[in-house]
Image: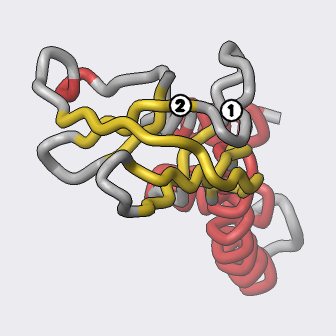
Amino acid sequence: MRKSAIAIGSLAGALLIAGCAPSQSPGVYQRDQAMRALEVQTGVIENIRSIVIEGNRSVASQIGGAVVGGVLGSTVGSGTGRRLATTAGAAAGTVAGQAAEERATRQQGVEVTVRLTDGSVIAVAQAVDPSMAPFMLGERVRVLRSADGALRVSR
C-alpha cells in the first residue's frame, strides 16, 4: 500500500511539473516577453485551419512514469522474477508517463494565413484562446513579431 502511495505521488508530481509548460495562446505572454517591443504589421485573414499543437514530453514525466512502473512491477513475484518485473515496469512506465504528459498538454490550435499590407503572405500557428471570439475570413488583424522571431495574430 505504501509503495502505491509513493507511485501515485510521483506521477502526480510529474504531471504537475508538466502542467507548468508555457502556453502558446495569443493572449498569454511569458514573463520574459512582457515589456518588450514587438514589431506590428497589419493584414487581412485569407485562410483559417484547425490544427492540434503537440504536447510536451519532459524528463519529469519519464522519471515519474519509471518510478510508478518500477514500484508497481516490484509487487509482482519474488527473487529474479521480481527484479525483472521491476525493470520491465520501470521501462513501460517511462513510455507511459511520457505519453500521458503529451496527451495532457496537447492543445487545440489554429493556423491563420494573413496577407500583410505589403502584399506578402504568412501563416501563423497558435493555440486557440477560448476567451476570444474565433477569427473570421477577411478580418483585419495585427501580426506581432518578437525579437526572437515568434509570431502571434491578434485583433
> Callout 2 environment at 10 Å: few (<14), some (14 to 19), or many (20+)?
some
Q: Residue at x 30, y 48 (%)?
A: 150
Q: Residue at x 83, y 59 (%)?
A: 75
* Residue closest to the eye, 98 or 46: 46
**In what quadrant of the picture does the N terminus appear?**
top right
User: Residue 71, can we see it?
Assistant: no
Where residue 109 sits: x, y (%)?
67, 46
Nearer to us of marks 2 and 1 is 2
Label of residue 117 in the image: none
Residue 20 is left or right of residue 75, and the answer is left
Q: Residue at x 63, y 61 (%)?
A: 98
Label of residue 135 in the image: 1
Quarter location, residue 66 = bottom right
User: Residue 87, can we see it?
Assistant: yes
Where residue 3 sits: x, y (%)?
72, 41
Q: Is residue 131 above or below residue 72?
A: above
Three-letter amino acid code of the residue under disc 2: Arg
Where residue 5 sits: x, y (%)?
74, 32
Where residue 143 sits: x, y (%)?
38, 38
Q: CA distance from mark 2 to mark 1?
A: 10 Å
Residue highlighted by disc 2: 140
Q: Is residue 72 above or below residue 94?
A: above
Three-letter amino acid code of the residue under disc 1: Phe
